[in-house]
Amino acid sequence: MLGLDKKDFRLLVIVVALTMLAPFLLNPFPESSGLAQFNAGYPDLMQRFVIFGIFAIGFNILFGLTGYLSFGHAAFLGVGSYAAIWMMKLVTLNVIPAIIMGVIFAGIFALAVGYISLRRSGIYFSILTLAFAQMSYALAYSVLTPITGGETGLQIKATDRPILSNLEPGEIGRANLFGMDMRTSFELGLGDWLFTFNSGYYIAAVFMILAFYLSIRIFRSPFGTMLRAVKSNQTRMYYTGLNARPYTLAAFVISGMYAGLAGGLLVAMDTQAGPERMFWTASGEVVLMTILGGVGTLIGPVLGAGAIKYMENILSKINKDILHQWFAILPDGIENFLVTIVYPFVGKGWHLTLGIIFMAVVIFLPGGLVEGGQRIARLFGRKKAKGDAEEATQSTPAE
């Protein structure tokens, strides 16, 4: 169905279900509970889950299939953001044209960068992409200030009058989808639970599902097979008369367009763009997402993006006061000791927790979170098979 085999279609259905039911799944604790601070079902964070999931899916098409590690993918995220914000400032506040322009400009920029960078491989390719990204950041931060807004970035202002809009004088335009505001939300209260359904999140979620479906088709296509051959033994491909460069360049451009889509969606949700999205740390973040979830897997990058964004937004909010509330039932000496031990791993120190988790995954789960899930599934599968075998070997006494 939809050109997918049974296994891939089942995976797509699971992703669709998890995405559509996210407001419920990400709010497991009631509002009055002390654990409610671990709920992640609010619009801004849910949007980031799916948008950076798109970013990681696209990066995985390049890194997971070809083995080419780019340290400059944030440049395409930034270019997509700037193209989208200018489309909204000059032409229309409808998010669809803005997102399309983000994808197109990111693809063109990726074509130029890839054409030069792919003349080298290995660490030299990675350094070239990092250099391009840092040059892009420097240009956006200072040299191209009239276009990029410099350090403060760009956003929709009261003086902006898009051609295809009917704004009143002094009115600040808002991103919309054919009139539907991206910030429109509906709240559903069930007992002590509160679930928020945001229009911007579901629009971004639809794009993520489409991007995930396209990545499945790429992975299972002859084109995807050629990319795996590049990763396996590029030299052997050349000996057989196959030129690998057009395939790697196509993968690089597709990956850059995914980043542009993510950048355009960020603008559609927040209507601002800044040079910080092109900094090297943003490129490193998508590398971490992909490795943490599982390089070369379909759903791994999405899981990695969700895990990192969850820690960034939830663990970073835990301070000493919250820790004292957690351990308040203990004697004062033990309470203060535990707060002292735990505090470096939360709040501003959440990066330390991320680093420990990342090292553990690399050492014990090279296949990322996906491999961890597969091991758990196999463990329960073996227990079930062992139980069935024992039951089958038991003899029934004759009557």
Image (spheres, rainbow, N blue to C red):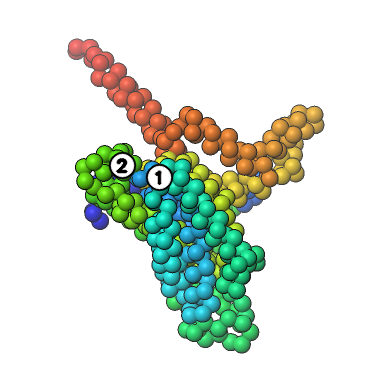
Front-most of residues 302 and 85: 85
Q: How packed is label 2: few (under 14 Cα within 10 Å), some, or many (20 or more)?
A: some
Snapshot quadrant of residue 260: bottom left
Residue farthest toward the top in the current orientation of the protein: 398
Residue 206: in sight, yes or no? no
Please identify the quadrant where the C terminus is shown.
Answer: top left
Q: Residue 17, image x and y in percent? A: 39, 52
Q: Where in the figure is residue 330, as x and y percent of width and height?
A: 75, 31
Q: Is residue 45 above or below residue 226?
A: below
User: For the point 56% across and 51% down, which residue is it?
Assistant: 280
Compared with 102, 381 (above or below) is above
The Cα atoms of the two marked residues, 1 and 2, are separated by 10 Å
Q: Nearer the viewer, residue 230 or 387?
A: 230
Residue at (32%, 51%) from the top-left corner? 245
Badge 1 crowding class, 10 Å Cα cut-off, few under 14, some 14 to 19, many 20 or more, is: some
Q: Residue furthest right?
A: 332
**Which residue matches tag 2?**
234
Whole-percent x, y for residue 368 in the image: 45, 37
**Residue ID for mark 1:** 121
141 lies left or right of 325: left
The residue shown at (73%, 35%) is 339
Give percent across and percent down for residue 251. Answer: 35, 53
Q: Is residue 336 above or below residue 95?
A: above
What amino acid type should be assigned to the residue bearing mark 1?
A: Ser
Q: Are marks 1 and 2 in contact (CB under 8 Å)?
A: yes
Kind of residue indicated by mark 2: Gln
Q: Which one is earlier in the sequence, the residue at label 1 or at label 2?
A: 1
Q: Secondary structure at mark 2?
A: helix
